[in-house]
């Protein structure tokens, strides 16, 4: 399935699609830009022109999946750190017994529970089509990555390849 710049949804064959890999920080999560520049769509192959809601929903589902994956990775890192704090000794005691580390680990555990709850809420909101789905997804992303400020940037272009920039984002 491909989404063309005209907001039409159509089926295209694999040889009509070019995937250009992006450089990413996490090699376990590869990303690519998908180009359908050589695709010619006959009228009888167009599945519909009112796909904006479906495109938005797929985007929301993808963001929830990334938030869940990030929260899960953070949980695993936390568990590993907690295990290490129990066995690493300093001054004859496990470093996890020191008050400063106890408080810091407790803070991280609390943040992780908040991220887990936010991701669960966002997933439910997107699944049910709740009106707060977009803010819920944004909140899940913020909590999952512990960001004070999040910027989402996507590449958009017109049919002629010119950038399509909007003055303000809305939902």
Image (tube, rainbow, N blue to C red):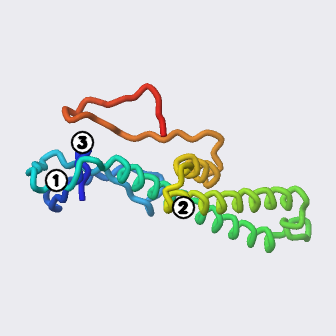
* Foreground residue among 100 and 118: 118
Q: Are marks 3 and 1 in contact (CB under 8 Å)?
A: no
State the SS at label 1: strand
Q: Is 18 drawn above or below residue 85 in the view shown?
A: above
Residue appearing at x 56%, y 62% in the figure: 124
Residue appearing at x 14%, y 59% in the figure: 15
Name the image quarter holding the N terminus. Answer: bottom left
Q: Mark 2 points at which residue?
A: 123
Give the numbered dot on residue 46: 1
- Numbered disc in front, either 3 or 1: 1
- Numbered disc in front, either 2 or 1: 1
| Percent coordinates x, y for residue 167 in the rendering | 43, 25
Residue appearing at x 55%, y 57% in the figure: 125
Residue that sits furthest to the top in the current view: 167
Q: How far apart are marks 2 and 3 (CA)?
A: 28 Å
In the figure, is residue 65 to the left or right of 45? right
State the SS at label 3: loop
Q: Name the residue under label 3.
A: 5
| Percent coordinates x, y for residue 73 in the rendering | 59, 64
Q: Which of marks 2 and 3 is nearer the N terminus?
A: 3
The quadrant where residue 93 appears: bottom right
* Foreground residue among 56 and 105: 56
């Amino acid at each position: 399935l491909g989404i063309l710049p005209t907001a039409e949804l159509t089926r295209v064959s694999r040889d009509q699609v070019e995937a250009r890999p992006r450089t990413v920080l996490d090699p376990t999560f590869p990303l690519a830009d998908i180009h359908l520049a050589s695709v010619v769509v006959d009228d009888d192959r167009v599945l519909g022109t009112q796909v904006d809601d479906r495109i938005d929903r797929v985007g929301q589902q993808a963001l929830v999946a990334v938030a869940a994956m990030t929260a899960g990775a953070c949980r695993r890192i936390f568990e590993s750190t907690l295990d290490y704090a129990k066995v690493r000794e300093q001054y004859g005691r496990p470093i996890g017994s020191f008050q400063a580390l106890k408080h810091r680990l407790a803070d991280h555990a609390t943040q992780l529970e908040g991220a887990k709850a936010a991701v669960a809420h966002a997933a439910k909101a997107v699944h049910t089509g709740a009106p707060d789905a977009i803010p819920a997804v944004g909140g899940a992303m913020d909590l999952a990555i512990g960001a004070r400020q999040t910027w989402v940037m996507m590449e958009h272009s017109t049919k002629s390849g010119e950038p399509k920039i909007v003055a303000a984002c809305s939902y």
